[in-house]
Image (tube, helix red, strand yellow):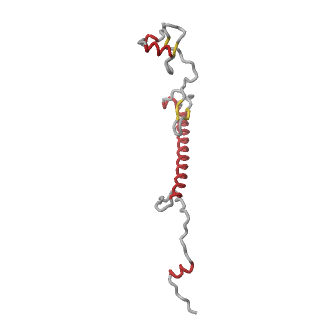
Amino acid sequence: MAASKKTVSQAAEEKEIKPVAEAPVPPTYEEELQVVGVPYKTLLKWRKSIDAEIERQKKQIEEDFRKKTLLEAEALGLSINKVFGIANTEAAEIPVEEGKTKRKRTDAGVKATPFYQNPNDASQVASRRGLHPKWMRDLLAEGVPIESLIIKND
């Protein structure tokens, strides 16, 4: 029996070799990311995964840095508040929008000391916080200088 010789193309046709159309596997971090020719939906999935991992690692780096800084400051007997010029650690941060925060006033809930007084009615006083009361707006509209409304401490 003589063995028949076949060409490579004939052998491929017999075995019916077909390319597999599976989604490519994301590369490991040692490899360079090749995205040319990757399907759009696959790229979107990768982006979602990559964004989530970036955010996770960013939070971990921030937490590690915070812990390290606190430990070093404590070892040196320093106050983080003094080092970074923070007035009061009890000032909470109030979330405003995603990614943004608004600091809560350190004197929130504390009754403000009167600074202005109505010269026509001593019971009407106002602090320097917030909007001016109606009596004060009326006097200022009449041309009374605001300096004349300041309570004098004798």
Count of marks placed on residues: 0
Q: Nearer the viewer, residue 90 or 46?
A: 46
Report the residue at 51% width, 15% height from top.
126
Picture coordinates of residue 64, whole percent (x, y) = 55, 42
Q: Nearer the viewer, residue 136 or 36?
A: 136
Report the residue at 56% width, 30% height from top.
92
Report the residue at 52% width, 39% height from top.
99
Picture coordinates of residue 146, whole percent (x, y) = 43, 14
Picture coordinates of residue 13, whole percent (x, y) = 54, 79
* Residue farthest bottom in this picture: 1
In what quadrant of the picture does the N terminus appear? bottom right
Q: Nearer the viewer, residue 121 or 154?
A: 121
Report the residue at 50% width, 80% height from top.
9
Picture coordinates of residue 38, whole percent (x, y) = 50, 61
- Position of residue 98 in the picture relative to residue 146 (left or right): right
Can residue 111 be seen here? The reply is: yes
Residue 117, compared with residue 14, is above or below; it is above
Can residue 78 be seen here? The reply is: no
